[in-house]
Image (cartoon, helix red, strand yellow):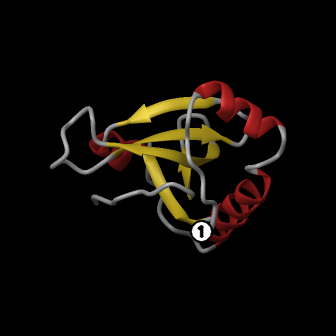
Amino acid sequence: MPHNLAVGEAVYYARDQAVGIIYETYTFIDGPQARPGVSLLLSNGSNVGGFSAQEADQFLLPLGDTGLDYRFSDVGQLAADYRRGLFGEAFHFAQVMHISKTLAGLPPQGE
């Protein structure tokens, strides 16, 4: 099912069995008329990089909005922001949303 992810949304990335936060959306790959692609930061600090809209539909399970308002500038700043805990509360919300969906018995997606 197609979905438009936005900055600050939590997702589950089954490949790494981890929650992540969308830190950037972009249209420069598929063009301005296409659904945006997204860039993903995992809870362990790994920058997984970008997913086209179709890849996001296939590999990322949306969990919900964390309330994080983030403006991506470069990967160095992203790493520094992660180290100083800027994403901590958002990752906490992401974990809670993932546990809630798991306990509710929702079918696995994003694999």
Q: Quadrant of residue 14?
A: top right
Determine the secondary structure under disc 1: helix
Q: Residue at x 34, y 59 (%)?
A: 4
Quarter of the image with the C terminus in it: top left
Closer to us: 105 or 110 = 110
Horizontal arrangement in the rendering, residue 109 relative to residue 89 (left or right): left
Q: Residue furthest left?
A: 33
**Residue 65 at x, y = what percent?**
56, 67
Picture mark count:
1
**Residue 31 at x, y = what percent?**
18, 39
**Residue 64 at x, y = what percent?**
54, 67
Horizontal arrangement in the rendering, residue 28 relative to residue 41 (left or right): left
Which residue position is annotated with label 1? 101
Horizontal arrangement in the rendering, residue 55 relative to residue 35 (left or right): right
Q: Residue at x 53, y 40 (%)?
A: 40
Closer to us: 46 or 86 = 86
Residue 69 versus residue 34 in the image, above or below? below
Q: Residue furthest right?
A: 84
Q: Decide: few, some or many residues near mark 1? Use Cα within 10 Å; few <14, some 14-19, many ≥20.
A: some
